Image (cartoon, rainbow, N blue to C red):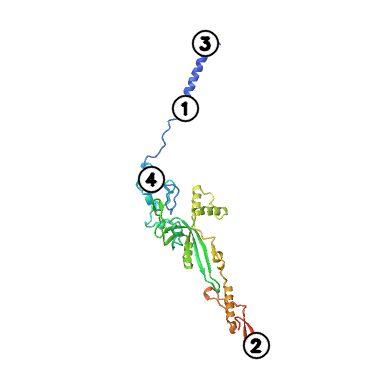
Amino acid sequence: MDKKKLMLLLGALVIAIGTAMAARSLFIGASAPKADAAQVPKGPKVLVAQRALPVGTIVTADSVAFQAWPKEMVQDAYFIDGEADMNKLLGTVVRYPITAGQPVTQGGLVAPGDRGFLAAALGAGMRAVTIPVSAKTGVGGFVFPGDHVDLLLTQTVPSQDTGQPLKATETFLRNVRVLATDQSTETTVEEGKTVVRAFQTVTLEVTPKMAEKIQVAETVGTLSLALRSLADNQSELDQAIANGTLKIPAGATKDQEEKFMADAANRPTDGGTTFVTGGDVSRFQRRTAPSPERSAQMIASNYANMMGNRGRMQPTYTPPASSGPVVSYKSSAVVRVTRGKTTTAEPVGGN
């Protein structure tokens, strides 16, 4: 190859390399523009919902938070950081549904003491009932609005024979939400600590049928509260799903499924009643109540033994009319009756 051709080839190679480097610089500059700062709304911070808040939700510290909001979109009804008192907002109740990320408006919350507060706190189809409690039956004051409790009924069943009465306690309602203690629907916090105080009444959220049961239970015996663990709701919910008692609707979205699960976990129940009798805690107490027939037989037999030496006979025992259809129970006991030199055995209740 002569010298002229070699110089042309080297020149073409230099031009190609320069063109490639220029093109590379051009592409890199176009594909990696100067990074702009994150688009942060320039405006005040407003109160927004951290999750979906259905009607009746009690506002807690983890359910809402202040978030920067475009200044031109801020409305007078919003709660503005620095102007709104967060301590006064805790314990209020959601009046209208609020979606996650949506600003909370002043008209969307009902504060304790406001008209319609308790009605707003109730879920759809639920009722509010109030029961009297003491330090003993009210968990020593460690029950606060928003907690969930079980209701226990303690009663003494009178004995129909000469034995001891039956003492029993049963759990007849579970997972009941506490709406208020006395006339307070909020928890008092002083210096960062929750104040425990005694109260005489508790207002509960129940179904109409449960409200009827509570009214009857108050006339039967003593009502007590048993505070539930926060973990109980989830474990019972998992068990209900596992055994098929609770079924998630087919085709539900993630948000719908979460709402369904939350509603199910907070729903009170009156099934699966459990009970304990005196015989379960002491060998000197009765375990079960005697049947009416057995009680009648024992009464007749005892009376016959008492009156046998006097030659008198006792008519058959008849239960009171208020206990149902009148049924006569004849005892197998006999009385020996002596007339002159003749002694006969007469059954109790015979002629």
User: Mark 3 vs mark 4: which is more N-terminal?
Assistant: 3
State the separation of the CA atoms marked 1 and 2: 132 Å
State the residue at coordinates (47%, 27%).
Answer: 28
User: Mark 1 vs mark 3: which is more N-terminal?
Assistant: 3
Query: As rendered, which of 230 and 134 lies closer to the eye?
Result: 134
Q: Are marks 1 and 4 in contact (CB under 8 Å)?
A: no
Q: Are marks 1 and 2 in contact (CB under 8 Å)?
A: no
x and y, in percent, of residue 280 in the image: 56, 64
Which disc number belongs to residue 4? 3
- Give the structural element (helix, strand or loop) at label 3: helix
Amino acid type assigned to the residue bearing label 1 in the image: Ile
Disc 1 residue crowd, few under 14, some 14–19, many 20+, Cα 10 Å: few
User: Mark 1 vs mark 2: which is more N-terminal?
Assistant: 1
Q: Are marks 2 and 3 in contact (CB under 8 Å)?
A: no
State the residue at coordinates (57%, 53%).
Answer: 242
Q: Are marks 1 and 3 in contact (CB under 8 Å)?
A: no
* Residue of label 4: 46
Disc 4 residue crowd, few under 14, some 14–19, many 20+, Cα 10 Å: many
Q: Nearer the viewer, mark 1 or mark 2?
A: 2
User: Mark 4 vs mark 2: which is more N-terminal?
Assistant: 4
Q: Is residue 68 left or right of residue 15?
A: left
State the separation of the CA atoms marked 3 and 4: 78 Å
Answer yes or no: is residue 151 visible. yes
Q: Is residue 329 left or right of residue 223?
A: right
| Up-down relation of residue 6 to residue 25 (above or below) | above
- Give the structural element (helix, strand or loop) at label 1: helix
Amino acid type assigned to the residue bearing label 2 in the image: Thr
